Amino acid sequence: MYIAIEGIDTAGKSTQIARLQEHFCDAIITKEPGATSIGRDIREMVLSARAQSKKAEFLLFLADRAEHIKEVIEPNLDRMIISDRSAVSGVAYALTQGEISKTDLVALNDFATDKIYPQKVFLLRLSKEELEYRLSQKELDGIELRGSEYLLKIQDAIIEAANLLGLELVEIDATQSIETITQEILQNIA
């Protein structure tokens, strides 16, 4: 089974993935962007916010996604795959930019992924107050520097992106305890 843990920065994706790894010892743990050699270079470029064009940023994500599917996902489809983000995030970020039509977003992602998407997507949702608190506790990267309003738009866009791609989305309140969140995910993996 291929699942993705989605959510805006600081939602607790890494924590939950570490917890899930305890339950699925043989799982492939991966992330998007940055799970491949090329992907690490692309991730660095995107997080540094060097791209002036939002279309260029989107195409960088697509290049990483295509490589990720080919190198990591496709060869392991017979195993449990747990991904920190997926095409859903890429589409969500692009939706907030508004420079690419929804039809093109779906078509380009279908092309990059060969229509290989997570079977379930878990969205760890944050309130504005909790997001702002968590951001205040860390050094911010290029995307986080865009602010809480921007990140909350991304959170809403994740729901729209999952719907556009026709994926099953499970929303989980990320302000709950770590254990409660883990249990909700496990109950929905069946």
Image (cartoon, grey):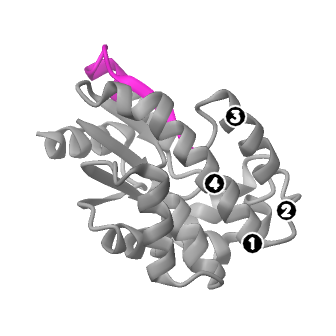
Kind of element beneath mark 3: helix
Q: Give me the disc on residue 51.
A: 2
Identify whether 13 is placed above or below 148.
above
Mark closest to the chain's N terminus, 4 or 2? 2
Which of the 4 image quadrants contains residue 43?
top right
Left or right, 63 with respect to 50, comes to: left
Question: Which residue type carries mark 1?
Answer: Lys
Query: Decide: marks 1, 2 in contact (CB < 8 A)?
Result: yes
Q: Amino acid at mark 3?
A: Ile
| Residue depicted at x 41% and y 71% | 161
> Which mark, by number, is residue 61?
4
Q: Quadrant of residue 78?
A: top left
Which image quarter: residue 99?
A: bottom right
Q: Is residue 10 left or right of residue 21?
A: right
The kind of residue on which mark 4 rests is: Phe
Label 4 vs 3, first from the N-terminus: 3
Viewer-side label of 3, 1: 3
**Where does the image place residue 125, in percent across and percent down from the top left?**
42, 62
The numbered disc on residue 54 is 1
Q: Position of residue 175 (x, y in %)?
A: 42, 56
Name the amino acid type tagged 2: Ala
Measured Cα–Cα span from mark 4 to mark 1: 11 Å
Q: Nearer the viewer, residue 25 or 178?
A: 25
Return the residue at label 3: 38
Relative to residue 51, is residue 2 drawn left or right? left
| In this picture, residue 178 sits left or right of residue 190 | right
Q: Residues within 10 Å of mark 1 (few under 14, many from 20)?
A: some
Residue occupying the point 63% across, 54% down: 61
184 versus 168 height, above or below: above
Between the residue at mark 1 and the residue at mark 2, the CA separation in whole angstroms equals 7 Å
